[in-house]
Image (cartoon, rainbow, N blue to C red):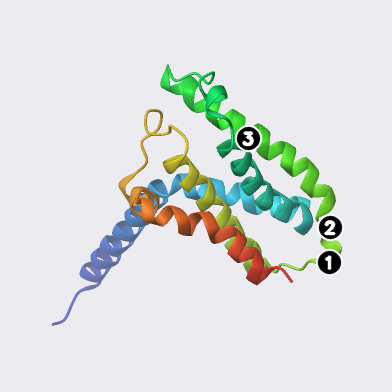
């Protein structure tokens, strides 16, 4: 069937509009993942291999310390209003992670490590996934922030928590040489 130039142009316009709207929708759905990934990636590129590995391991050390807080002390953490409760939990975790990072950045030296660009990309994505998994399953995030349904599919199921939790350490095992 012969088409005119205007018909062809209309088809191209429809395709471009649909593709642009799909990309915009996808970007909006995964904005939290994209922002966290970018923060991890820029941190890795700025500070180098050793401190980046130290940060990833400090995330685990911070969670281990956070999870080991005795029940008597958890009663001191505010539970209302929801925003205060959220920032209290995240602040405690961030404090433990920061102290662990200060220790680990001195221990992990980059002279003995090599992680390529694709390794940084994967580890940055795995680190972002780790933090989002903690946000879904450990911190009281639901009362403060509503994730998009697309992000819910990746992080909300409890059986996915384990896989997101181990992704950075497994990535370090295979990608750091």
Q: Nearer the viewer, residue 125 or 27?
A: 125
Residue at 65 percent of width and 68 percent of height? 173
Image x and y of residue 3, in percent: 18, 76
Looking at the image, residue 62 lies above or below residue 164: above
Residue bearing the label numbered 2: 109
Q: Nearer the viewer, residue 107 or 40?
A: 107
Pointer 2 with pointer 1, Cβ within 8 A: yes
Is 2 on the left-hand or right-hand side of 13?
A: left
Q: CA distance from mark 2 to mark 1?
A: 7 Å
Question: In what element is the residue under mark 3?
Answer: helix
Is 19 on the left-hand or right-hand side of 89?
A: left
Is 143 on the left-hand or right-hand side of 174?
A: left
Q: State the quadrant of the N terminus.
A: bottom left
Compare marks 3 and 2 and give the one earlier in the sequence: 3
Question: In what element is the residue under mark 1?
Answer: helix
Q: CA distance from mark 3 to mark 2?
A: 23 Å
Q: CA distance from mark 1 to mark 3?
A: 28 Å
Quadrant position of residue 98: top right
Residue bearing the label numbered 1: 112
Judge whether residue 125 can be spotted in this image.
Answer: no
Q: Nearer the viewer, residue 157 or 129?
A: 157
View extreme (bottom): residue: 1
Quadrant position of residue 19: bottom left
Residue bearing the label numbered 3: 94
Q: Nearer the viewer, residue 26 or 151?
A: 151
View extreme (left): residue: 1
Looking at the image, residue 42 lies above or below residue 5: above
């Amino acid at each position: 069937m012969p088409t005119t130039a205007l018909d062809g142009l209309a088809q191209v316009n429809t395709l471009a509009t649909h593709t642009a709207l799909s990309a915009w929708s996808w970007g909006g759905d995964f904005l939290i993942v994209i922002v966290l990934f970018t923060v991890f990636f820029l941190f890795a590129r700025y500070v180098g291999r050793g401190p980046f590995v130290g940060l990833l391991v400090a995330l685990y050390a911070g969670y281990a310390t956070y999870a080991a807080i005795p029940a008597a002390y958890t009663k001191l953490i505010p539970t209302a209003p929801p925003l205060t409760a959220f920032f209290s939990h995240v602040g405690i975790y961030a404090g433990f992670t920061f102290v662990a990072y200060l220790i680990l950045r001195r221990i992990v030296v980059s002279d003995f490590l090599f992680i390529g660009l694709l390794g940084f990309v994967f580890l940055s994505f795995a680190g972002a996934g780790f933090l989002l998994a903690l946000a879904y399953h450990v911190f009281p995030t639901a009362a403060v922030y509503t994730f998009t349904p697309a992000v819910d599919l990746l992080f909300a199921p409890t059986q996915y928590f384990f896989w997101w939790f181990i992704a950075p350490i497994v990535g370090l095992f295979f990608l750091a040489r």
